[in-house]
């Protein structure tokens, strides 16, 4: 049983698992920020420009509510809340845009670092003779052997 717990502890403490957990928590908090941005900042002006429409209240009522909320015989309405769907789509697009921007930026940084590392490795490599120098040395050797054999 102690082997199980030690393996579990090793699994949990791996960098990628901890990083993933942090990413999930930060992502959840970021979703709250984006939802507030969409619902409280972006959608009110859009609704105002479209004639005072509150997108979150847009819906198609299929069956009206019966009774008073909280009453024993209350039956809630049945509705398709397409305004909330519009808000969710806009939230998704904003999150996707931000993630795309972050990933693209990280790829640029990674490419620059790789390029820099390759350049450093090129500088560290000892420079050998050029092709012209090698051909000149071969020619000299051939001429030397030609004179010796004559």
Image: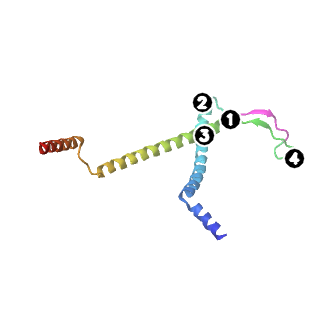
Instruction: Residue 76: give x, y in percent of width and height.
Output: 81, 41
Quadrant of the frame with the N terminus: bottom right
Which mark is first along the chain, 1 or 3?
1
> Callout 4 environment at 10 Å: few (<14), some (14 to 19), or many (20+)?
few
Q: Is residue 95 above or below residue 8?
A: above
Secondary structure mostly seen in magenta is loop
Q: Which residue is mark 2?
A: 49
Q: Position of residue 114 (x, y in %)?
A: 40, 47
Residue depicted at 48% across the width and 42% down the height: 104
Contact (CB < 8 A) between labels 4 and 2? no
Please name which of the two marks, 1 or 4, marks the residue nearer to the observer: 1
Name the disc covering residue 83, or none: 1
| SS class, disc 2 | helix
Q: Earlier in the sequence, mark 3 or mark 2?
A: 2
Question: Which is in the foreground here, disc 3 or disc 1?
Answer: 3
Residue 58, quarter of the rendered image: top right
Q: Nearer the viewer, mark 2 or mark 1?
A: 1
Q: Give the camera-side residue of 129 and 28.
A: 129
In the image, which disc is placed on residue 92?
Answer: 3
Q: Relative to 121, does residue 65 appear above or below in the rendering?
A: above
| Nearer-the-camera pick, 26 or 103 | 103
Q: Mark number for residue 72?
A: 4
Task: Relative to 93, say whether 123 is above or below.
Answer: below
Q: Position of residue 26 (x, y in %)?
A: 57, 52
66 part of magenta stretch:
yes
Residues in magenta? 58-67
Residue 17 highlighted magenta (yes or no): no
Give the distance between the C-alpha atoms of the residues marked 1 and 4, in whole angstroms. 29 Å
């Amino acid at each position: 049983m102690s082997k199980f717990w030690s393996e579990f502890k090793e699994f949990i403490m791996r960098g990628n698992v901890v990083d993933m957990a942090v990413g999930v928590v930060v992502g959840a908090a970021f979703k709250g920020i984006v939802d507030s941005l969409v619902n409280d900042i972006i959608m009110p002006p859009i609704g105002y420009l479209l004639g005072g429409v509150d997108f979150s209240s847009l819906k198609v009522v299929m069956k009206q509510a019966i009774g008073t909320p909280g009453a024993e015989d209350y039956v809630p309405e049945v509705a398709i809340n397409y305004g909330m769907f519009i808000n969710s789509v806009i939230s998704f697009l904003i999150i996707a845009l931000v993630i795309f921007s972050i990933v693209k930026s990280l790829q640029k940084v990674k490419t620059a670092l790789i390029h820099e590392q390759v350049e450093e490795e090129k500088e560290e490599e000892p420079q050998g003779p050029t092709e012209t120098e090698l051909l000149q040395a071969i020619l000299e050797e051939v001429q030397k052997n030609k004179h010796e054999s004559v």
